[in-house]
Amino acid sequence: ELFVSAGPDIVKRVRDTGASVFLDLKFHDIPNTVAKAVASATRLDVQMLTVHTSGGSAMLQGALKGATEGAKQTGNEAPLILGVTVLTSMDESDLNEVSVNKTPEAQVIHLAQMATSAGLKGLVCSPKEIAPLREVLPREVKLVTPGIRPVGSETGDQKRVMSPTEAIEVGADWL
């Protein structure tokens, strides 16, 4: 929301303070378009950014290529590309609605394995899938978890949530 309302200038202003930027725009398009979008984001000197894993291996490899090219052009470090697996607002019935006939856990594992095979070193997943992912992925793969809610709080539109303590205990790298 902030990026759409304030534009690339807000990234520059935050970076000027010395803070890191996690640009959560969830790119999902043809490989060439994603590569160019990621290269542009890299030129803004962001440290992490998101792409949808459901875009497939070629799109994910395009994102990595864009990050490398953007970094080379500016001398910035390439950001950590995080593959968004299944949105935390989705449950099995939501997946079925879009013709995915798997549980969220099975779909997350499938997309995570495909994404890491394509070269991604980080993923976004609900905290409910951290433990199963830690069983099948290399430990160096970073897991970012939305859907974090204090015990007893409202979940809003989030369906697969956990408390901060629980998410850390099962292996989240960032909440």
Image (cartoon, rainbow, N blue to C red):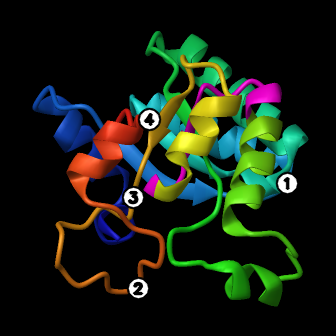
- Is residue 108 depicted above or below 172 in this figure? below
Span shown in magenta: 116-127
Give the class, few, some or many, for how many residues have Cα within 10 Å of label 3's Cα (few <14, many ≥20): many
Report how far apart the C-alphas of labels 3 and 4 lie in the structure: 15 Å
- Asked which secondary structure carries label 3, the reply is loop
- Is residue 84 depicted above or below 169 in this figure? below
Sequence-first disc among 3 and 4: 4
Circle 3 sits on which residue?
Answer: 146
Report how far apart the C-alphas of labels 2 and 4 lie in the structure: 24 Å
Circle 2 sits on which residue?
Answer: 157
123 part of magenta stretch: yes
Sequence-first disc among 2 and 4: 4
Which residue type carries mark 2? Asp
In the picture, measured across the screen, residue 90 lies left or right of residue 64, that is left
Circle 1 sits on which residue?
Answer: 30
Sequence-first disc among 1 and 2: 1
- Asked which secondary structure carries label 4, the reply is strand
- Is residue 69 depicted above or below 84 in this figure? above
